[in-house]
Image (cartoon, rainbow, N blue to C red):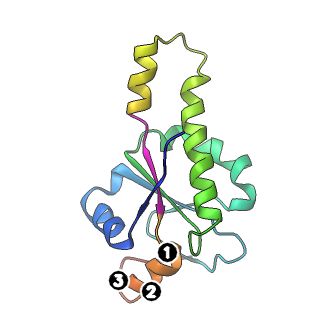
Amino acid sequence: MSTLSYVSPDALKGWLMESPNEISIIDVRDYDYEGERIPGSVRIPSDTFLASVDQHVDDLMKKRSLIVHCTYSQVRGPKAARVLSEILRNRITESKEKLSLSQKEKLFQNLPTVYILHGGFSAWKRRYGGQQGLIEYD
């Protein structure tokens, strides 16, 4: 199992500005979701994450980086990131296609990197709450 890394709000902002089509942001907040989100994020609440994430996996596998967060990224965000990383890896190992070991290794190398947003949405909002275009509202 791969080690998960954290990404800072500043680095994520840079990625959003430079290559927004290469990343996906997954917001796993539940009851604490108040209608504000990072632009372009997909909301998959942690209480339904396992049941819901599979419908997004094909699209997520096309990205270079996946950033997962909850409010503070202390429990739900890291847990969802670990689960997502495992689901992506299992998609290859459990493939019904006959793949050689080298083909599987290449697929593993091309899997998106899963990151956890350091400080979660709270840190993002604290840093960028007043800047236009960096928070979307329902």
In the figure, residue 107 lies in which quadrant? top left
Q: Which numbered tag is attached to residue 132?
A: 3
Q: Give the distance between the C-alpha atoms of the residues marked 2 and 3, in whole angstroms.
A: 13 Å
- Horizontal side of residue 106 vs 29, given as left or right: left
- Give the residue displayed 60% in from the left and 31% down from the top: 90
Along the polypeptide, which appears first: circle 1 or circle 3?
1
Instruction: List the single residue furthest toward the left.
Output: 18
- Horizontal side of residue 26 vs 83, given as left or right: left
Q: Give the distance between the C-alpha atoms of the residues marked 1 and 2, in whole angstroms.
A: 10 Å
Q: Is residue 115 magenta?
A: yes
Callout 1 crowding tier (Cα within 10 Å): few <14, some 14–19, many ≥20: many
- Give the residue displayed 64% in from the left and 75% down from the top: 33
The span shown in magenta is 110-116
Q: Amino acid at mark 3?
A: Gln
Instruction: Please report contact status of discs 1 and 2: CB closer than 8 Å, yes or no.
Output: yes
Q: Which residue is mark 2?
A: 126
Q: Amino acid at mark 2?
A: Arg
- Give the residue displayed 59% in from the left and 75% down from the top: 71
Instruction: Please report contact status of discs 2 and 3: CB closer than 8 Å, yes or no.
Output: no
